[in-house]
Image: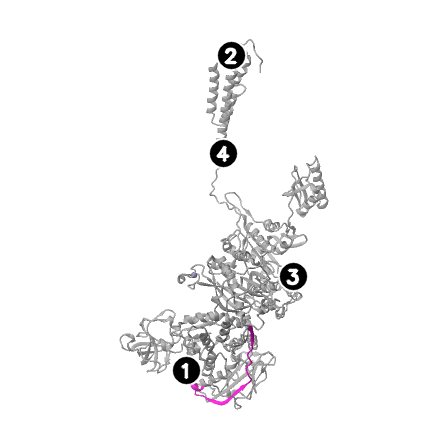
Amino acid sequence: MSGPNSDYDPVEVTPLRADEVEAMRDAALDAIAGAHDLGALKQVRLDHAGDRSPLALANREIGALPPQARKEAGARVGQARGAVNKAIAERTAVLEAEQAERMLAEETVDVTLPTGRRRRGSRHPLTMQSELIADIFVGMGWEIAEGPMVEAEWLNFDALNLGPDHPARTMQDTFWTVPAENHVVLRTHTSPVQARTMLTRKPPIYVACPGRVFRTDEYDATHSPMFHQVEGLVVDEGITMAHLKGSLDHLASALYGDGITTRFRPSYFPFTEPSAEVDLRCFVCRGVDSDACRTCRGEGWIEWGGCGVVNPRVLIACGIDPEVYSGFAFGFGIDRTFMFRHGLEDLRPLFEGDVRFSSAFGTEI
Amino acid sequence: MKAPVSWIKEYVDVPEGTTTDDITRRLTMTGLKLEAVHSPGAAITGPLVIGRVLTKEPEPQKNGKVINWCTVDVADANDTGEPQGIVCGAHNFEVGDLVVVVLPGAVLPGDFAISARKTYGHLSAGMICSARELGIGDDHDGIIVLPADAGVPGQDAREVLGLDEEIIEFEVNPDRAYGLSLRGIARDVAVSVEGASNFRDPALRQTPAANDAGYPVVLADTAGCPVFVARKVTGFDPAAPTPAFIADRIAAAGMRSISLAVDVTNYVMLETGRPIHGYDADKLTGPIVVRRAVAGEKLTTLDGVVRELSAEDLVVTDDSGIIGLGGVMGGETTEMSETTTSIVVESAHWDAVSMFRTGKRHKISSEAGKRNERGVDPTICEAAADRVVELLVAHGGATADPGVTVVGTPPAQPTITVAGDKAARVSGMEISEQTAVEALRAVGCEVTGTGTLSVVPPPWRPDLTDPQDTTEEVIRLVGYDKVPSVLPVPPAGRGLTRAQQLRRRFSRVVAAEGFTEVVTFPFVGDADFDQMRVPADDVRRKALRLENPLSSEAPLMTTTVLAGLLRTAGRNVGHGLSSFGIYETATVTVPRGGATRILSVDHGPSADEFAALQAGLPAQPFHLALVGVGAAEEAGWWGEGRTADWADAVDAVRVVADSVGIDLAARGVDHAPWHPGRCAELSVDDTVIGHAGELHPKVCEAYGLPRGSVAAEVDLDVLIERGVHLRPAPTFSTHPVAKEDVALVVDAAVPAAEVEAALREGAGPLLESIRLFDVFTGEQIGQGRKSLAFALRFRAADRTLKEGEASAAREAAVSLAAERTGAVQR
Ligand SMILES: [Zn+2]
């Protein structure tokens, strides 16, 4: 910048002329307003606020004015430049916002396009049904017990009061293994897990045993050589049939909805006495106008499983004193439970492994 | 057991208005479970009447057949009173016989609608019926000819035929052997059905006293056969027909009518529950002796089968040798026939266990055996024999021989000692001692004492031996429907075990990787191992064999989950699916040469005994197997898809292992069913947990899978056992990172993991992470060589690295890699 110029005629110096300064300012403001993109505005900034812009040049003249004139001229030019800079800042903000908006608009996609790049997995409904049942037991404070599928004959039969000459032993069609003298079978029920539990824990025992079991049934719509069961076992002091009923009623309502209860019909199982078959109040018709109900076929009740008071002979074989402890046990089919709940009439899809079947159930049921 | 309601009512009175439904409901609640109620006439609607044959004109046909053109009097049943013209193909009737006529408008079983129709040149207006056409028997050799006094023409034939009868079918549990007789069922009706009364025991009869004039019998094994009653009839007419009431009732029970003599023994068995055997007396020689067989002795039973006997079998013999398998099945040589005129009636009590074993050993399932092995009332041998004699005399024209042989005595009934409040304590109901005593007396027990009851069960209840048995009787009679509902309060539980939680987690992790769970049967055969290319000497072929597999193709318990999974994958491809992943978690069976024993049931096994039992079972590790077919990622608007490859299979397993903090080591191996050059053996420390990679092309072909399909199978038990339970919280350095890349050329056969391990060790403690980001082969690298590019990140825990520190660490890493693997820096 040049220094004060004493030869300069202040009258001739532009800044002193208010109308000139205003004209410069107005021209700048017009140009700013007329800039329609950031590129144009950049040029406007050079032209009207840059070092070579009229207002910058005018500002440079101020130093040459006599002191008394400087103040007024300085204020005038300063105000004009301030207004221009402010307008540029505002316009920049507006244009930047506009540009950002335009860019986002240009980036718009069709969000209805398919998104499944990764293959979805799913779990088998019987696994999930089994877990759901186990969770109910855990919620009741019971624990989950397990045992092997290939089992000792003694645990599958003898310990459960199914001696070699027990007529009921022929009721269960057993897969035997070779050689016979090894006394190894595919377990026909999850009851050997109960025996194992009694042999390895001390009462009080509150356990449920879900698992795979095998019978020599030909494979058809209602029979499978492999299926899933869950059994419950309680051994404690003072346990009665009333506790059995209470536990089954609780399970029934947890699995099938509030108000679903059970009823007992006399039956026979070697491992329990008294023994009963358990029926479940039909969860579809609830026993009201059952005639048209397909789920219970007009009965109002659905056959659910078997149960009873643990036979003292079983307690003895499993090393528990029947004079001190009593217990109850029950069992029902996990596959059947699933089929009821989900309206599956033919069980074969459960074991045929068609991906479309499991996929229909996702990862939770 | 099938019992006609009218037969039940012969022995017990039920109040007017008691329905069959009322009876079955009560019996079911006290222990005789209803299976079904059959009403043979239910499928017949419309006019079914008695007719009298007025004319019968045989008319030979061109096809050689002779039909009869008949007119039949059906009175007003046809609304005209005129004789009904009917064509009949049967010949077993004469003019004047009463027959069963179904008229047009009626419907017979099988939705067979009857209408007048032109046939053999006549208008045949209806049908003369056979038992088979009415659905009440198998007899189709001829039409039904009714007894002359059966009724009059035009009368509804339903009642005469017993078509209005209801037959109750019971499911008889092993503890309800008495339910295999009308006697037992009627007694239960008397006890259980409200208002039922006046039970008339068909086995309660005056029988002639035993004497020495009867057929000689010697019991050489009184444990096996404690009582043997023999009676004899002579002058029996072997041609005498079976009276209708006997034939109908045994047919209703599901047994075939054979001859009067046989039918009578079956009838009395149904009536009393006591199996009876009849011998042709003229074929017997010398005294009857009951003994155990000598192993190897042979007998041809009634069914014509030659049976080699065991020393446990009870046999009936005479001087000729063995003449019957006692209580199970008679022999051929003394069988009653169409010429039998003298009969020796055997009514003997047999040991139930022995009966069960013999039946099972010889695979004989007979009505007699079914009752004898469940237990029969031992006190009614004389009554049952006497009833048979009575019927043979009444209907077969026989004369009862005065000789009556009774050898042995029925076993004494046990006395059961039971607390008077036991039923209350077991049931959780308020059952007074008096109620319990009354219930026990109602089922026939003798009860004495108070506080502690002495209970002698009736002889027809061999199942009642324990206090628990009598307790069940009491609770059943009080009513299961009255048991209250009380939720027991367990001690606080500990939730799922860690293993249970991990099994769930593993399954969820694999599903999240895009695999779908399936469940398959664990049965395999050698063909499965062949298809999987498992070598002949591979341990996986040493599988547990089933004695009685469902299919001879699959007699083994699988040692690999992949066997079922590969089949399932092939089936899915067959169903038109081209890209999918499936998995299964299941135990496999690995024999280890052990055996288990049958232990005592009188006490719990010792710890050693239980451990031995456990060790005697095959190992049953819990496996995960998975198969990937087609695209891991589909092509789409986003671009190209990606076909699943060996690395996807390995990574799916790694994700599972990572979930429990386990870093799996891989090693290339040749292992079926995988591609010999694309199979990773995966291990934790030095324990191999399984394999993953691309399937052998021949295996893919065998299962119908596209080439390049991938698979894995690992033992999850190891991951559960070795998984890090409590992982320490990490600390991070926030000092600046120094990045160094390095490219190393090694022999193509050198595993990348070895190079990485050397770099990691050589780089020392400043190394934060190392990642292989590129593998390059090509001419500039050289034949049989590959270039591996690693990104290394260095950072100190406590300070900023000094100039040159990171590069020095990198140099150290490279030189160790060079020393260990021959790597050359590019
Ligand atoms: Zn319903």
User: Residue, x 44% and y 69% (percent of image)?
Assistant: B25
Q: Dot 4 corresponds to which residue?
A: A103
Q: Nearer the viewer's eye, disc 4 or disc 2? A: 2
Q: What residue type is labelled 4?
A: Met
Q: Distance between the residues labelled 1 and 2?
A: 150 Å
To the question of a shared chain for discs 1 and 3, the answer is yes
Q: Where is residue A308 in the image (x, y as percent from the top left)?
A: 53, 66
Are discs 4 and 1 located on one and the same chain?
no
Say the numbered circle drawn on residue A310: none
Query: Residue B573 in magenta?
Result: no
Q: Which of marks 4 and 2 is nearer the N terminus?
A: 2
What element does badge 4 sit on? helix
Q: In which quarter of the image is residue B523?
A: bottom right
Q: Do the residues labelled 1 and 3 touch (CB within 8 Å)?
A: no
The label on residue B537 is 3
Inter-mark Cα distance, 1 to 3: 70 Å
Give the vertical position of B262 relative to B768 (above or below): below
> Which residue is at the front of the view, B410 or B657?
B410
Q: Can residue B696 be seen in this view?
A: no
Which residue is the site of mark 2?
A13
Q: Is mark 4 within 8 Å of ligand 1?
A: no
Residues at circles 1 and 2 in contact by the CB criterion of under 8 Å:
no
Badge 4: chain ID: A
The total of numbered circles placed on residues is: 4
Compared across the picture, whether A83 is left or right of B126 comes to right
Q: Which residue is drawn at 52% across and 90% down?
A: B211
- The quadrant holding residue B756 is top right
